[in-house]
Amino acid sequence: MMEREVVAKMAASADGQTKYGQSVKGLLTEKVSTCGADVIALTKQVLKGSRSSELLGHAARNMVMQEDSILHSEDSLRKMAIITTHLQYQQEAIQKKGELMLREWRRKLLCFHISQLFP
């Protein structure tokens, strides 16, 4: 009988070890799955943060470019205002010169007519 008891105990022990091994294996599989899901979630967050940083970088570069364009436009407007002032001075000078020339031509024409009337 002893042999049978030993065999029964060994079988029970082996069955217990098998159940324990399957239990540990199940827990390990569950933990690995959870860990894998956590790694995937972390990777997604890192990628999202990286994309956000990339978008912020693009926005900052675009803002700097816009600022440069605005400064360049302001400079161009100042130069155009100076040119406009100079053109106004030139227009006034041309107008005065034209008026003087017209008076001179009228005077000469009048003198010519008078000389024709009274030779």
Image (cartoon, rainbow, N blue to C red):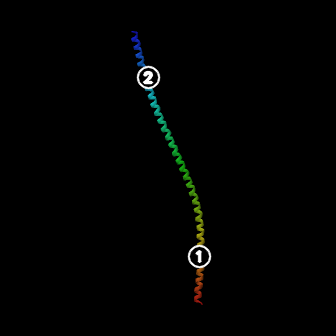
The x and y percentages for residue 96 are 60, 73
The earlier-in-sequence mark between 1 and 2 is: 2
Q: Residues within 10 Å of mark 2 (few under 14, many from 20)?
A: few
Quadrant including the C terminus: bottom right
SS at circle 1: helix
- Badge number at residue 41: none
**Residue shown at the point (54%, 50%) measured from the top left:** 63
Q: Residue at x 57, y 59 (%)?
A: 76
Question: In this view of the protein, which residue sits in the foreground, 61 or 104?
Answer: 61
Judging depth in this view, the residue of 82 and 30 nearest the camera is 30
Q: CA distance from mark 1 to mark 2?
A: 114 Å
Question: Which structural element holds mark 2?
Answer: helix
Residue 67 locus on image (x, y percent): 56, 53
Q: Quadrant of residue 69?
A: bottom right
Q: Which residue ends up furthest to the front in the rendered image?
A: 3
Q: How many numbered marks have been drawn onto this rendered protein structure?
A: 2
**Residue highlighted by disc 2:** 21
Give the amino acid type for the residue marked by disc 2 in the picture. Gly
Q: Which residue is pictured at 54% across the width and 49% down the height?
A: 61
- Camera-nearest residue between 60 and 32: 32
Residue drawn at 60 percent across, 74 percent down: 97
Q: Answer left or right for 105 relative to 1.
A: right
The residue labelled by disc 1 is 99
Neighbourhood count class around disc 1 (C-alpha, 10 Å): few under 14, some 14–19, many 20 upward: few
Q: Can you give x and y, in whole percent of width and height, for residue 53 in the image?
A: 52, 43
* Residues at discs 1 and 2 in contact (Cβ within 8 Å): no
Q: Amino acid at mark 1?
A: Glu
Side of 66 relative to 24 (left or right): right
> Where does the image place residue 9, in percent across and percent down from the top left?
41, 14
Q: Residue furthest bottom?
A: 119
